[in-house]
Image: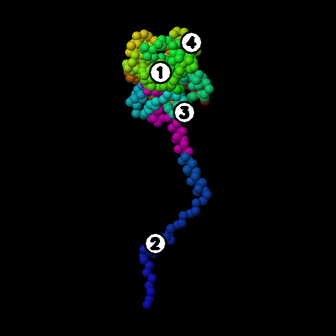
């Protein structure tokens, strides 16, 4: 019996197709090098793009304010809302910080890109003087505008036996948060009256906690450097009877002689509830700062929005913000950001933009 082998046409077709397949050629060393080169080029393009973007043109900007209850925090919120409402290009994110000294360190490390700080601390951080004498220089930021004067205020209960600075000896006194401008001012004012930390029991608290502790009797006084009328003090004056302590002329003169950024400042009577007398003290300028990482165009845009809408900012702030192009550049000892300088140049004002070196 004959045997037949059956082979399907599908199998034959498959064999024929397989005959036409070409086995992949082994990769040569040149092919491998070429592929590596292509990958390296792609990485280089990505790095280049990232570096180009380091002059931050992206819309998100972190803004360093200070503790809740102070003027920095109110200004930060108002400023962020203003910029975001006037330009969809920018999204300002307000960050709560310990205050001026902390803001300067955070700016220097690019954790934040804009902030407000006291001019005395700005100068010290930038030039490695004062409390920054034994630290590195904190730079990488420049000035945009001087905003307003901050008053150094000393708050006590109305029935306290503290009538003058000398009466703080032996008392428990809050000198603000650590690394805040208030802390530096408080220590300088106490030292001007010969009151070191062995003679005064000092504690570090934010303004809100200090107000609570004063009301409860856990502290005898607290310092607060902020624009007048200061929200936390104003609210406290509605809850309990308080007083502000004046500095005498000798103390004011000693402070002005020792620290060039202090100016004489008078808090008018009636600023706070039951305040019947004017208060003599010293003040320092609050300055708006911008990171060097922000582009010239970005800072110029923001500076222009700030000046064009100063009335809107004034309505929101409890302090008198005197924003005009001439006074905004007075008393600033560090360089101005290129973007701010470009704005001032349009108004016939030339400012220094030369960067310091780390």
First in sequence: mark 1 vs mark 3: 3
At label 4, counting other C-alpha atoms closer than 10 Å, the crowd grade (few under 14, some 14-19, many 20 or more) is: few
Q: Reading the chain from its start, which is encountered first: label 4 or label 3?
A: 3
x, y percentage for residue 112?
A: 50, 32
2 horizontally vs 257: left or right:
left
Task: Specify which label sits upstream in the sequence, 4 or 2.
Answer: 2
Q: Name the residue under label 2.
A: 14
Nearest to the observer: residue 124 or residue 193: 193
Which mark is nearer the camera, 1 or 4?
A: 1
Over which residues does the magenta segment extend? Answer: 44-71
Neighbor class of circle 1 (other Cα within 10 Å; few <14, some 14-19, many 20+) is many
Quadrant that contains the C terminus: top right
Tag 3 residue: 109
Mark closer to the observer (4, 3): 4
Secondary element type, mark 4: helix
Q: Considering depth in this image, is 229 or 212 the residue closer to the camera?
A: 212
What kind of colouring is applied to the model shown? Answer: rainbow
x, y percentage for residue 114? 49, 29
- Direction from residue 274 to residue 147 in the image, left or right: right
**Which numbered circle lies on residue 219?**
1
The residue located at (46%, 27%) in the rendering is: 67
Residue where numbered disc 4 is placed:
254
**Would residue 300 be counted in the magenta stretch?**
no
């Amino acid at each position: 019996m004959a045997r037949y082998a059956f082979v399907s046409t599908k199998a034959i077709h498959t064999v024929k197709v397989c005959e036409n397949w070409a086995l992949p050629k082994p990769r040569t060393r040149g092919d491998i090098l070429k592929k590596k080169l292509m990958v390296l080029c792609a990485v280089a393009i990505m790095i280049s793009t990232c570096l180009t973007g380091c002059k931050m043109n992206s819309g998100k900007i972190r803004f360093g304010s200070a503790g809740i209850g102070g003027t920095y925090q109110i200004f930060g919120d108002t400023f962020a809302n203003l910029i975001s409402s006037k330009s969809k290009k920018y999204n300002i994110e307000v960050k709560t910080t310990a205050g001026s000294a902390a803001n300067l360190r955070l700016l220097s490390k690019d954790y934040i890109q804009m902030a407000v700080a006291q001019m005395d601390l700005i100068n010290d951080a930038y030039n490695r003087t004062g409390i920054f004498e034994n630290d590195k220089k904190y730079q990488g930021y420049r000035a945009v505008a001087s905003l307003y004067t901050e008053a150094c205020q000393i708050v006590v209960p109305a029935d306290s036996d503290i009538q003058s600075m000398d009466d703080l000896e032996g008392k428990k006194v809050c000198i603000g948060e650590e690394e805040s401008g208030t802390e530096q001012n408080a220590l300088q004012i106490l030292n001007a009256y010969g009151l070191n930390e062995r003679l005064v029991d000092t504690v570090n608290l934010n303004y809100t906690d200090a107000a609570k502790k004063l009301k409860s009797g856990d502290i005898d006084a607290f310092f607060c450097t902020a624009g007048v009328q200061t929200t936390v003090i104003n609210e406290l004056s509605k809850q309990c009877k308080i007083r502000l302590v004046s500095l005498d002329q000798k103390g004011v003169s000693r402070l002005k002689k020792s620290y060039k950024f202090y100016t004489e400042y008078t808090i008018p009577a009636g600023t706070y509830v039951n305040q019947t007398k004017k208060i003599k003290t010293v003040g320092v300028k609050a300055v708006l700062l911008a990171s060097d990482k922000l582009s010239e165009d970005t800072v110029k845009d923001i500076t222009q929005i700030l000046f064009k809408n100063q009335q809107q900012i004034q309505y929101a702030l409890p302090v008198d913000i005197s924003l005009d192009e001439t006074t905004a550049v007075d008393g600033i000892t560090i360089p101005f950001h290129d973007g701010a300088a470009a704005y001032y140049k349009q108004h016939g004002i030339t400012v220094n933009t030369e960067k310091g070196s780390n």
